[in-house]
Amino acid sequence: MALRIERDGQAFCSAYRQFAYELTWLPERNYIVGTEVELRTKLFRQFCEWTMHHIEMERADVLFSPEIKRAGPDALQNRKLRLLFKAKLLRMVRRGEPVTIRLAATPSLYAGMDLELLVWVRTTVGAGADQSAEAAPPQLESEQPCRLTVQAGPVERLSVYARPFPGPGGTVRTCIVPEDRYGNPAAFERPVTTEWTWAGRTGTLALSEAAVLELDAPERLERPERAEVRIRMDALSLRENIANGEAAEDALVVRGNPVQPERVDGLQPAFGEIHWHTEEASAKDGGRAMTEALRCARDELNMDFAAPSDHDPTRAEWERTVDAVDAFNENDSFATLYGWENSTNRGHENYYFTTSDHEAVRGGKAGFAPHTLEEATAGLDAFPPERVLAVPHHTNSSAALKRDGVPAWHPYNWMEPRPYRRLVEIVQHRGNQERNDYDDAWRGMVQQQFASVQDALRAGHRLGFTGGTDNHVGWPGRVVHQQRKSVILTGVWTTRVAREPVFDALWRRHTWAVIDTRAIVWFAVGGVPMGGELPHDESAELTAVIRIHAEAPLQSIEIVSDGETVWAASSSTPFVDLQVHLGKPPRPTYYYMRALQRDGGFMYASPVFVVGRHSAGKEGE
């Protein structure tokens, strides 16, 4: 190995702490004075996630470092190079002669986003006694990286994630997960005895790290049930806390999310995440393995379904993706879909399907490999529309990265509606995309781009809502907001937790988006559930039904039509069961519901579309 660790900083996830390392470079050949030595990261996301504060190298003149910017690439070029440090040797070093490198860094907020360092070397070659030397292209000295690891920090949270509906065996799968402050699954310093309560029953569990319980569902529930877990404060070490727990005498109590007692119109609720990236595809834009990401989605955030969405996978990468997706797919337990992301300078969208050799596989049997949104649309138009979903995301955003002052990509180009563009990611790590102006509570990080979800609805698109993270760290469902853990998911009403039924629920737009809550949301207008279509009848009185089982009292509940709030209320409890009179719609329109919990979590229910009689059902509902 060209680079080895002598003193390991033992990094854990932290927004501020700097960890010190001492490395030894063992050159694999002799290098003369003037040779340039570079440290680069192996993957782009490692370069983005870690922050370097100081790097020094003995017997060398520093040309580029966190503190010195001379003789280095510009920011745009460095996204490709991933250069952290460059120095020029002040004396010759011989093969195997140790050279010390010291660095200080703040790691990623996501555990497992290790930093892999590679040594690149650029020598100078002379062309003759009277000709100046010129630099040769840099060469990777060793393909074996030096890995700086980052682990979860001390336990500061306890999360109780229950599946929102009992499984076919009559039990509710429940994950109890100690976490650090950023949501990374962590471990207690010593096993902690916890007490759980569920539907009038109690039990104990010795907990060191994440554990899965199968809790017997009662024969009948009057309302959604929530599990409780209690930990004595004196069982925690001085470094540990349960910051999200409520104090109850000498213990801290954490409550789980609601569990639905029965089906609604033959449908059950399920939660998942279908927009996250791994290290699998060519861009290496996710930092963690797909298999590990799927395991975490299933066993730590306890999702019902998931789908990866790596950028532009090659054929070989797609085959590995299919292997991973199929390995985790299990009917009535955990459903997986196939998907990938197409990023253009006029909009990003993901494609999802249930067969691994679908025409929309990049470079597959149909040769689908679009470079522009227009090319993608033309290709998708030629495929059977009911078996592929195209889901635009961060539609109201533009790239922070600029070349000559021009963003690398722009807000989404909402062209004519298409039957396969039935969903839109309304919220993600770049913030809320619903509208062009927000109160701060709604996390509207980008505004006034005029390509929002409301702009699309105004233009005639019939879109259901999903919540995705678009995270590039291989942790489905997770983002960090204001230096704290945040979780974004999509809820669906499905006949079954299995690949085809979940895809069908997405296709029918029976969806709602949630952030920092697993609220169970049912919304219907005129007897038609969210995502559906209702023929316009100007003489008909419409009534909306809202049922929410949230995790905190609701600061606001709103029904929106044509971009305006047409009804609003609040609730002092997390449970809402309302009928709202909407009157007679004078023209075709839509109605959707949004609600904000008093703890900051919020949710969006997909619209019900009141459509002209001649256009009803044209999008394949």
Image (tube, grey):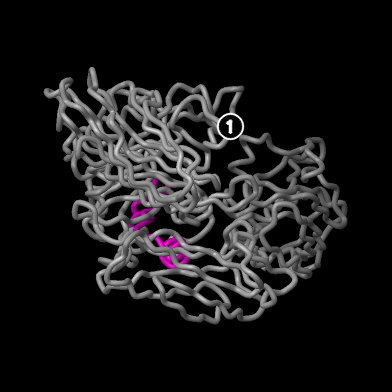
Side (left or right) of 363 relative to 284 = left
Q: Which residue is farthest left?
A: 614
Residue found at x 27% / y 45%: 510
Q: The N terminus appears in which quarter of the rendering?
A: bottom right
Q: Is residue 284 among what the camera can see?
A: no
Residue found at x 87% / y 51%: 90
Picture coordinates of residue 79 (x, y %)? Answer: 60, 41
Task: Residue 483: say if magenta.
Answer: no
Task: Residue 308: say if magenta.
Answer: yes
Look at the numbered disc 1 and give the secondary structure of its residue: loop
Q: Is residue 546 among what the camera can see?
A: yes
Picture coordinates of residue 553 (x, y %)? Answer: 49, 48
Side (left or right) of 466 relative to 539 = right
Label 1 packing within 10 angstroms: few (<14), some (14-19), many (20+): few
Picture coordinates of residue 223 (x, y %)? Answer: 34, 59
Side (left or right) of 266 relative to 376 = left
Q: Which residue is farthest top?
A: 586
Picture coordinates of residue 501 (x, y %)? Answer: 22, 55
Residue found at x 41% / y 64%: 162
The residue closer to the viewer here, 241 or 9, is 241
Residue found at x 33% / y 64%: 334
Q: Which residues are magenta?
A: 293-320
Q: The C terminus appears in which quarter of the rendering?
A: top left
Which residue is under mark 1? Answer: 400
The three-letter amino acid code for the residue at tag 1 is: Ala
The residue closer to the viewer here, 399 or 156, is 156
The mark tally for this picture is: 1
Compared with residue 166, is residue 605 higher up or lower down, i.e. above or below? above
